[in-house]
């Protein structure tokens, strides 16, 4: 959403994306399992008093998240007289519970998932639902009970772009990482379930992505429950996934070509 009237939306979503990236690193790299369980519980309870139970580096993160999301909800309350703090808190808690399950898989605290078990968790952990529901509120979407229920029960209009986002992300996983066996993703799970090689698994994932695009296009065209700008954002999320991951992981490990694309799009002037 590049139009001038959406500047506040872009600012808000930048904050959301920054929190997602930071917290994802905590769950992937920095946090111990006991710390991750404490942080997940703190976000699920959305209680400022719980912060005392967290290690210092998590206190800073939780307080920043708590204050920022509450501020966004206050802005929506002023305009629409509807308190969305419980909705947003549940969004973040659901995503962090998905993060926590992935951490348990990686640390081998629980049995590795089947492909279907992995995907059911992974379309939530990829953060698409958090991004899109915040998008809806930042675009000043209406707050009817029906619409809010669709959002908070993760309507298919949220699910399909999230699946595309997740599967594109998994395709960016290197062959070396898969061979080491330290990563739980759709490719490794499909290989284990079906006894196929990596290339066959990758081809299957591409077929699933194509199928998800068809479902998303059908649902988007046939939807009259959501405003056009929000529906366009769901499609843009899926497009963004292809852009970021078509040449590896350009989010976590951008290569020179990826950096050049960003400069061309944002910094360098457009010439005739």
Image (cartoon, rainbow, N blue to C red):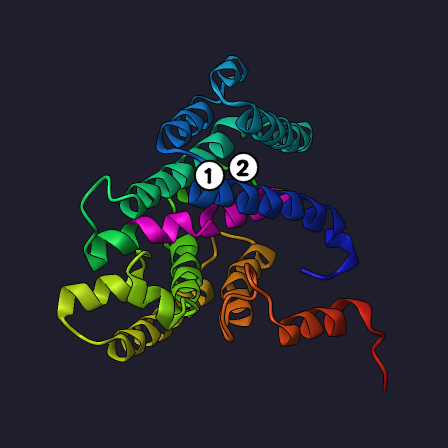
Q: Residue furthest bottom?
A: 272
N-term-proximal mark, 2 vs 1: 2
Q: Is residue 193 left or right of residue 53?
A: left
Q: Where is residue 67, by image quadrant?
A: top right
Instruction: Looking at the picture, tell me which residue is in the foreground, 137 or 52.
Output: 52
Which quarter of the figure has residue 150? top left
Q: CA distance from mark 2 to mark 1?
A: 6 Å
Crowding near the residue tagged with mark 1, few <14, some 14–19, many ≥20 C-alpha atoms within 10 Å: some
Which residue is painted at 35% across and 52% down in the image?
122
Q: Residues within 10 Å of mark 2 (few under 14, many from 20)?
A: some
Whether 173 is drawn above or below 153: the answer is below
Q: Is residue 187 magenta?
A: no
Query: Residue sitting at 29 percent across and 79 percent down?
Result: 199
Part of the protein shown in magenta: 121-141
Q: Overall secondary structure of the magenta stretch?
A: helix
In the displayed structure image, the side of residue 3 where residue 14 appears, left or right: left
For label 1, the residue is 148
Q: Depth check: 236 or 105 in front?
A: 105
Residue 166 visible, this orientation: yes
Q: Secondary structure at mark 2?
A: loop
The residue pinned by badge 2 equals: 143
Residue 187 placed where, x, y %? 29, 66
Residue 45 horizontal/vertical position (percent)? 43, 21
Picture quadrant of residue 192:
bottom left
Percent x, y of residue 163: 38, 60
Determine whether the residue tagged by mark 1 lies in a helix, strand or loop. Answer: helix
Location of the C terminus by quadrant is bottom right
Could you tell me if residue 141 is visible in this image?
no
User: Where, quadrant-wise, is the N terminus in this rendering?
Assistant: bottom right
Residue at 70% in and 69% down: 262
- Answer whether labels 2 and 1 touch (C-beta < 8 Å): yes
Residue 92 on image: x %, y %: 47, 36
């Amino acid at each position: 959403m590049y139009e001038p009237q959406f500047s506040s939306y872009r600012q808000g979503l930048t904050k959301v994306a920054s929190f997602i990236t930071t917290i994802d690193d905590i769950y992937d790299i920095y946090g111990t399992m006991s710390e991750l369980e404490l942080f997940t519980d703190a976000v699920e309870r959305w209680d400022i008093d719980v912060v005392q139970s967290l290690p210092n580096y998590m206190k800073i993160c939780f307080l920043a998240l708590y204050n920022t999301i509450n501020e966004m909800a206050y802005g929506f309350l002023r305009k629409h007289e509807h308190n969305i703090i419980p909705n947003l808190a549940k969004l973040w808690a659901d995503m962090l519970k998905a993060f926590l399950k992935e951490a348990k898989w990686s640390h081998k605290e629980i049995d590795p998932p089947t492909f279907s078990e992995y995907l059911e968790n992974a379309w939530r952990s990829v953060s698409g639902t958090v991004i899109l529901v915040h998008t809806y509120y930042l675009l000043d979407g209406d707050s009817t009970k029906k619409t809010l229920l669709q959002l908070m029960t993760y309507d298919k209009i949220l699910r399909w772009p999230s699946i595309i986002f997740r599967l594109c992300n998994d395709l960016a996983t290197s062959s070396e990482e898969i061979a080491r066996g330290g990563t739980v993703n759709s490719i490794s799970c499909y290989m284990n379930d079906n006894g196929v090689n990596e290339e066959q698994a990758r081809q299957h994932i591409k077929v699933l992505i194509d199928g998800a695009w068809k479902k998303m296009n059908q649902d988007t065209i046939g939807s009259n429950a959501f405003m056009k700008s929000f529906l366009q954002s769901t499609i843009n999320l899926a497009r963004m996934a292809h852009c970021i991951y078509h040449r590896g992981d350009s989010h976590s490990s951008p290569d020179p070509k990826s950096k050049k694309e960003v400069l061309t799009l944002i910094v360098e002037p457009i010439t005739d």
